[in-house]
Amino acid sequence: MDTVDFARVVAEFGSGSALLVEPGTAAAAHVPAHWAPIAGARDPRVRCAAAVALWNLDMFELVPRFGAVLAECLDDVRVCLLRGDWVLLYALRKPFQPHEFRIGWDPATFGADVPRHWDALPEPLRVFLGMVHAGFTDLDGISFGLTRPRDMQTYDELGLAESVRNWDTDERIPGDRAMLIAKGLGDTNYFASPDLPGDTVGWEYGGDMERPMDFGRTLDDLMGYGFQLERDLPPEPAAPVTPDELRQRVAALPTVRAARAVVWDRELTEDAARARIREIVTELLDALGGQLAARPQDGPDGETILPCDDDAGNVYQVDRLEARYFLEPPPPDRPQAYLPLILRIWEQQGWKVTTSTGADGIFGEVRTADWYELTLSHRDDEVLRLAVASPGFQRLR
């Protein structure tokens, strides 16, 4: 277990804004009574166990994967006085980076009144926010968890979109009926509303929502984003085989891994790959109800033949076909509003979506069940791009 740098996190809050409570100090005598075992314990394992024991069991039924994250990735929990409010700082491991921190506020800081659309939240979550933590988020106070009930306000009150367009029903949810409860990657907003079906949450970007999503599963994905569990790890490699055994196995397979992350399909042809790519694009446009048009980029259909190579400089006698498109909405719709809608459509196909953000923009990637790779990107030029690459095939030369 790595040493947790709580001092660095406290310093990020600003000079005089936060006080980390050390075991055995005078400050430890003033923490909330239900956190006294955490404040007084010197063993991080004891502090973690005491903090998790406070969580209501039905909350773990609502977000089971994040419950596993707490069990496997939680390294330490400390009591802190943050701008006059008592909080718990949770330090969780993430692969290849320093600890990720979450803030859990003292339930006494809930606020004088319940939020306006409080009943739109699932009951386990209302219990958690009222009895365990009055807000559980990233260090910014709103991302990757539930913001503080005292800060849960409607879109009207926050000056966000006047209404949210529900593409599922082609109706709009008024701003005074949508309550912001969390934020995620790429400035996506999560909101609760009495106008959504029971036990669902809205997920929108730029005022557009494809359809409501299951509240528990969506919250579980948001809270557990980026954490790696034992069950996520690849299986242990099989015992080594002889060269003759390997050649026999390869000869018997319809598809062969020709390079890192590239699959070679013995039965695939260039024409079949081209037809399948067009089919994938057509299915996506149909799922969007014809709201977007796909315009090929440079070249015939924006196509490029890609060689199969790997990081070691090896080039394989196999090619791939990639087609690139501009996805254009009707005016005055903004292209970036469609990015989360498309990612959600892919998720509903059962494809695992990987998203990333950087200086070049926002990106989403998936691989279909038949090994076609889809990349969606939105860059600073405000253009939405789609690239579809086929598995490898042997092209006639």
Image (cartoon, helix red, strand yellow):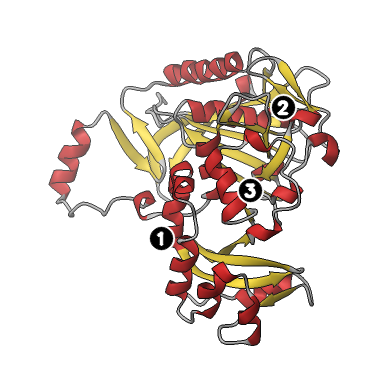
Q: Which amino acid type is marked by label 2?
A: Asp
Residue 322 in view (yes/no): no
Return the x and y of residue 240 as percentages of the image width and height: 18, 54
Are the residues at dot 1 and dot 3 in contact (C-beta closer than 8 Å)? no
Q: Identify the residue at horizontal 39%, vertical 27% (top origin).
A: 370
Mark before the other along the chain sequence, 2 or 1:
1
Residue 302 in view (yes/no): yes
Return the x and y of residue 38 as percentages of the image width and height: 52, 73
Alpha carbon separation for disc pair 2 and 1: 36 Å
Q: Which amino acid type is marked by label 1?
A: Glu
Left or right of residue 196, residue 70 in this image:
left
**Quadrant, the N terminus:** bottom left
Q: Which residue is mark 3?
A: 146
Neighbours of disc 2 within 10 Å: few (<14), some (14-19), many (20+): many
Mark 1 or 3, which is nearer the eye?
3
Mark 2 or 3, which is nearer the eye?
3
